[in-house]
Image: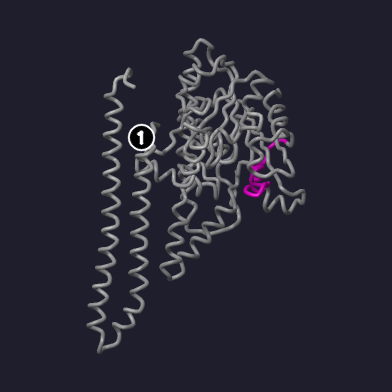
Amino acid sequence: MSDLGKWRGLTALVVDAVTAGSTAVERIQKETAARPFAILEQIEPIAPASRVVHTIHDVSVGGVHGIIRVVARGVGTAIEVGLGLAEARQHTRSPTDP
Amino acid sequence: MGRRLDETLAVLNGVVGDHLARTGNELVTRMSFAHEGRALTPEDVVRTTPPVSHRAVVLVHGLMSTESIWAFPDGTDYGSQLARDLGVTPFYVRYNSGLPVADNGLALAHLLDELIAACAASSSGPLEEMTLLGYSMGGLVVRSACHEAAAGKAGFLRLVRRALYVGTPHLGAPYERLGRVVSAVLRAVNDPVTRLIADIADLRSAGLQDLGDADIRHEDRKRRSPALRLSDWQHPVPLLPQIDHYLVAGSLSSEPWLADLFGDALVPVPSALAADAGGLRLDHVRVLEGRSHVALAHDPEVYVQLCAWVGGP
């Protein structure tokens, strides 16, 4: 395994961890918030407003975590490209180069 | 690659090695022979390890470790000491201990076939005898490989006279079964946080989970759920009758009930001695008191016993 291969593997592992961690935290935040919202949505006068707030909450939580995952994948891809370029440069360099 | 980095990667592979393999991650360890810290093919290891004698001993490490687990402080190990004292050639296997034991067993079976072919094609000539030595999970991988060979999927078994197991949980490891129960209890609680903790606990690798019941075949893994239990079942795969088996167990305590419960701190003595195997000769088993699990991999008294068994008739 080359050094660049190890960096590539580490990058992929970190992206996997951030993605899985963000998905898990998003689920917890939504499930935790669902409990008080479930009670509020049973109270007739405020039920419609509660449902709207609940939806806004879930969408915003999902949005924030979605951005985290997209950024993580983007950074991972950028590092991949950088490592690929470094590898290509290593291969094209002649053995006599310093 | 530095030894420290190798050991770090071995831990990573032990914890999430199945995920690394599934996702094609380049940090994954592929099964190979290892010589002076380098992973080698069977052809390369035969070329690099002159002179190869006609008797080989194959050392298979345990969970989350590399061949460095065998090292004594003076740099020797069971393999090099057996080479010095008995003239056998040691071969050290390195593998991804996070994969299912059955996968590693099949890979080991093929690797041993390739080793036999590489020796036969080399100037040193064919191997005539092979001894398998497994430490901890490595013993289960050895058993799995022998099982695959006995089922006709590999041919190396004809050269194997004996298998030696050091601290191998033949009947499973209770801490893994305890972890399984705790995870199930946490998952049963209707709370997102406890479920998250259970999810994190269940990220542990397939290889680690196989240790709970010493599952050496894929079909054995199916009997794992949904039953939750802290006690052993009898292992459904017996020790192969066509080879001799020698077992070393460690015990932190001389009290029999403590040895039965805790053994070397990770593997209870009845599990390390395959207590349900039956028919094992008394001189094929050895219990060493005052030894922790890790210490068994590089212990002078264990070596004396291994040497006597390998050098015996």
How crowded is the residue under tag 1: few (<14 C-alpha within 10 Å), some, or many (20+)? some
Magenta segment's dominant SS is: loop
Residue B265 on the magenta segment: yes
Give the left or right position of residue B262, taking residue B90 as reference.
right
The percent position of residue B307, horizontal first and vertical second, equals 70, 27
The percent position of residue B271, horizontal first and vertical second, equals 64, 46
The colour scheme used to paint the residues is one colour
Query: Which chain is indicated by disc 1?
Result: A
Quarter location, residue A29:
bottom left
Q: Specify the segment rendered in magenta.
A: B264-281
Give the left or right position of residue A63, taking residue B297 as reference.
left
Residue tagged 1: A4
Q: Is residue A56 above or below residue B232?
A: below
Quarter location, residue A27:
bottom left
Q: Is residue B178 above or below residue B82?
A: below
Seen at 64% across and 30% down, the residue is B244
Question: Quadrant where the C terminus of chain B lies?
Answer: top right
Give the left or right position of residue B254, taking residue B140 as reference.
right
